[in-house]
Image: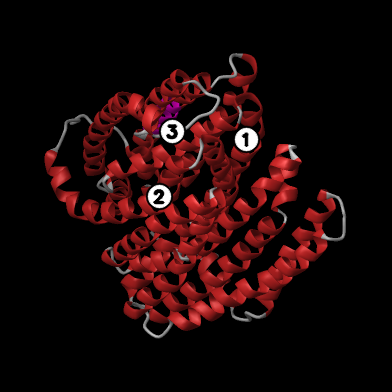
Amino acid sequence: MRLSGNLLAGLTNSIWSALIGLAVVPFYLKYLGIEAYGLIGFFVTTQALLSLLDMGLAPTINREVARYSASGNLKEVGKLLHTLAIVYWGMAGVISLLIVSLAPLITEHWLQSKYLSQQTIEHAVILMGLVVACRWPIGLYQSALIGAQRLTISSGINIAMVTLGSLGGVMVLAFVAPTIEAFFIWQAGVGLVYAATMRWAAWRVIGRFKDRRFDIDKLRQIWRFSAGMSGVAVSGVILMQLDKVLLSRILSLEDFGRYALAGVVANGLYVLLTPTFNVIYPRLSALVVTGDADKLIELYRSGTRLLSAVLFPIATAIAVFAEEILSLWTGNLSFASSMAPIVALLLIGTALNGVMHFPYALQLAFGMTRLPLMINVILVIMMIPMTILLAMQFGVIGGATAWALSSGIYLLMGTWLTHKTLLKGLGLKWLLWDVGMPLCLSLLVVGIVGDEVREWGYSNYVELFIGSGLVFFAFLLVILFSPRLRFAVQNNFFSDEPHD
């Protein structure tokens, strides 16, 4: 399949999931309130942190399925998948028991509430454990499908289950019971169906076999690769969730709910970032194996500039028109006004962090796991005191500022460390031209002009229409200043060259 086909499948999945996620938030706020929505934000953070227990097994099954599929030895894949499935389902039970046992402590000593009762919060935390347990094996079977190049199946199942979970959740709140307990019970049921469907699809693709038993030798064969990926994954998840963990303790549940809601908007950029990484990483890896340095540099630079040409104008527009977007989205002008600066700061951080997907993919393509691990550890050490100090001094705005500052540091430090080792001498060019040029054009065209448009007094719809035009104009300017970009994109994204 072409890179464009893989990217289209991933984008469709990401866009639909994001749109559904954004569409249901006003209903969650209506039926549950901001404090209960804060519990949903806490659940999302908890689920992300618990993914640390994956120990790199999901990316490992992805790699092994792809490798064995190429050699036609799917029986060995089946043995590994069955063995890892036993591990995963066992871990699901342990995680559920862990959260249930810690629920009273979390309720009493961690979460701060003004309006929700302690009993309601404790019940919600217990149900969070059930939801996490039901959803836990999904990552294993999904990775197996991706490794088998069945992105259409994986994306289709995900779209169906996200729709069922989100829209069904609204129906439950509207017609059954408008409580956080009812919400999490529904999510647990959907999660179990989701896992069962993914399991069925994975085994249908790989094929069932008679010799189904736990094979410890399979675990011994993969532990080194799994351990390396686990270190990177652990540090990455800690880095991405650290602000939320700290702020859930420092801020009131109401303020944390606002931060979580702003994070939903900022994380909308991952609609673009995640499928881009999933497409670009295998191609970079293939070019490293073939030793084609010229094509590697061309893809690395043109891919970064293309991502920046789309990412920065969109992020800038949402940041500038955040109040208008939030007002239309939630229907609450005062709420939108208080949320707008938080959203803008989180968007800045997420956009700067997002463009670093290319150096990260380059590091992994060369088989370097120590470098991203070192970068993540440095950022975590810096981010902890920064977040605590700024949040205690300035509240939720301080927490968002810490995320923006840490992402800016990541861009500068990560670029320097990456190109000190890989593609030496390219770092400054990449930073100035492939990242800096699209960023500056976005700030000039979308940022400055967009801010001026807001002073003209048009309706929200007209302002957003003009903002969309500014985004498109900024994108065209980047293309205009990049004469080789169109050729590079055509060569790398729309060729029929096979890839991993």
Mark in the foreground, 1 or 2: 2
Horizontal and vertical percent for residue 444?
A: 70, 73
Q: Secondary structure at mark 1?
A: helix
Q: Amino acid at mark 1?
A: Val
Residue 454, by quadrant, is bottom right
Please, what is the dominant secondary structure of the magenta stretch?
Answer: helix
Q: Amino acid at mark 3?
A: Leu
Give the residue pinned by disc 3.
111
Q: Residues within 10 Å of mark 1 (few under 14, many from 20)?
A: some
From this view, report whether residue 288 is shown above or below residue 62.
below
Q: Amino acid at mark 2?
A: Leu
Question: On the rendered image, what quadrant is the C terminus found in?
Answer: bottom left
Question: CA gap, disc 3 to disc 2?
Answer: 16 Å
Q: Which residues are magenta?
A: 191-200
Q: Which mark is residue 25?
A: 1
Q: Residues within 10 Å of mark 2 (few under 14, many from 20)?
A: some
